[in-house]
């Protein structure tokens, strides 16, 4: 390893230590963040589980849906899947700096997705599908460089998919079906996505050509682009995707010139 690389790695470790020991982001910040999240939630059901369970008299590491690190009382996972929660996502969620897993799938969260989620640099899974979120996908998501799964299906998202998403080289699943996303896919979208296995973009308003660079996403198993406004030919390079199991392209304006190669 070169000297420069070693110095850089030392610098990174130092950053880790600084982040862990940071005086303004500590375990009481985590508790504060969770209480902020709770305060933005109103449930339509009488037995609001968080109201009783997320009680300040008890350690937040014992709260339902919360998992802490084994080494220190810092939140590493937050799983609020299918809890009939209604409300907005508090921006303080971006202060849970040790979070690697965030799942709020199948609730009734509405409003915008906070930009602050882009501060969660350790995040590997971001699963916020099947809510009523509006607005655009935050550009800040491009900072989530460890993300393996980004799933925001079944919301009311508009605007284009930020280009920064296509720079997350750890990404394995990108699932954005059932929204109102528009715009085109950049032709070089796969240049940094060599680990991508699932590209789920059906049921949006995406347009333009299907990128020829899809073949650079060489591990793709599933490509689902149906119910959009894509035009033009199916790139013949798709025929090079040796792992491909599903190619779903129905209901677009695609010409079938190359269909025989797949
Ligand atoms: C944690 O951070 C808060 C907010 O910056 C600060 O007030 C508090 O003193 C810190 N607690 C510890 C134990 O470091
Ligand atoms: C909250 O729920 C967890 C998991 O079900 C349980 O272990 C814990 O005792 C509960 N805490 C309170 C205060 O109800
Ligand atoms: C989600 O919760 C509903 C009840 O609110 C239940 O019927 C359903 O089975 C749950 N789904 C899962 C996957 O746990
Ligand atoms: C947490 O997040 C909020 C909103 O993003 C911010 O105002 C606050 O300063 C952050 N830090 C702490 C220690 O709570
Ligand atoms: C999603 O939540 C609704 C309402 O609580 C429930 O009826 C449904 O079964 C849930 N779906 C899944 C896949 O868990
Ligand atoms: C993606 O990464 C490349 C180089 O790694 C950089 O030049 C480009 O600006 C990045 N694009 C976005 C939208 O972040
Ligand atoms: C597809 O694969 C063939 C051989 O397997 C290779 O010759 C060709 O250059 C590849 N095309 C693309 C666009 O990757």
Image (spheres, rainbow, N blue to C red):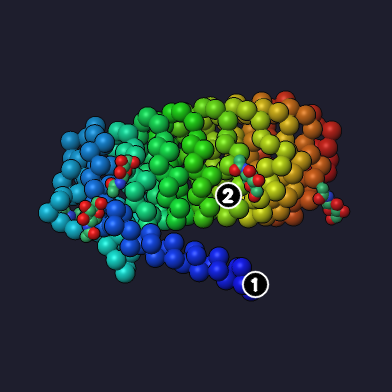
Residue at 37% x, 29% y is 111
Residue at 51% x, 55% y is 146
Q: CA–CA distance between discs 2 and 1?
A: 25 Å
The image quarter in which residue 46 lies: top left
Q: Is residue 221 above or below residue 41?
A: below
Quadrant into which the N terminus falls: bottom right
Quadrant into which the C terminus falls: top right
Q: Quadrant of ligand 6?
A: top right
| Contact between labelled residues 1 and 2, with CB atoms less than 8 Å apart | no
Describe residue 190's horizontal placement relative to residue 16 as left or right: right
Q: Residues within 10 Å of mark 1 (few under 14, many from 20)?
A: few
Q: Nearer the viewer, residue 183 or 172?
A: 183
Q: Secondary structure at mark 1?
A: loop
Describe residue 224's horizontal placement relative to residue 35 as left or right: right
Using the image, tell me which numbered label, if any, was put on residue 94. none
Q: Nearer the viewer, residue 181 or 130?
A: 181
Describe residue 164's horizontal placement relative to residue 26 as left or right: right
Q: Which residue is mark 1?
A: 2
Image position, residue 94 (x, y; %):
37, 46
Image position, residue 19 (x, y; %):
38, 59
Q: Residues within 10 Å of mark 2 (few under 14, many from 20)?
A: many
**Residue 197 visible in this rendered orientation of the protein:** no
Q: Secondary structure at mark 2?
A: loop
Image position, residue 213 (x, y; %):
74, 44
Farthest residue, direction left = 57
Q: Which residue is mark 2?
A: 168
């Amino acid at each position: 390893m070169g000297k420069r690389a070693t110095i850089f790695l030392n610098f990174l470790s130092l950053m880790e230590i600084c982040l862990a020991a940071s005086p303004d982001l500590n375990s009481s910040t985590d508790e504060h963040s969770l209480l902020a999240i709770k305060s933005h939630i109103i449930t339509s059901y009488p037995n609001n589980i968080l109201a009783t369970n997320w009680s300040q008299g008890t350690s937040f590491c014992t709260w339902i849906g919360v998992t802490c690190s084994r080494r220190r009382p810092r939140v590493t996972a937050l799983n609020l899947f299918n809890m009939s929660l209604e409300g907005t996502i508090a921006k303080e969620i971006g202060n849970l700096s040790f979070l690697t897993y965030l799942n709020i799938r199948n609730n009734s969260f509405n409003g915008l997705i906070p930009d602050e989620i882009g501060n969660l640099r350790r995040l590997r899974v971001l699963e916020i599908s099947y809510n009523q979120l509006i607005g655009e996908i935050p550009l800040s998501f491009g900072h989530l460089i460890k993300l393996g799964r980004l799933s925001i299906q079944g919301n009311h998202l508009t605007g284009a998919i930020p280009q920064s998403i296509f720079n997350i080289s750890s990404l394995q699943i990108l699932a954005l079906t059932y929204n109102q996303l528009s715009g085109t896919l950049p032709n070089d979208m796969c240049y940094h996505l060599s680990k991508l296995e699932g590209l789920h973009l059906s049921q949006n308003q995406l347009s333009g050509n299907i990128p020829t660079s899809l073949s650079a996403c060489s591990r793709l198993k599933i490509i689902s682009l149906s119910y959009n406004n894509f035009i033009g030919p199916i790139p013949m390079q798709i025929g090079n995707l040796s792992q491909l199991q599903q190619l779903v392209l129905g209901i677009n304006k695609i010409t079938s010139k190359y269909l025989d190669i797949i």
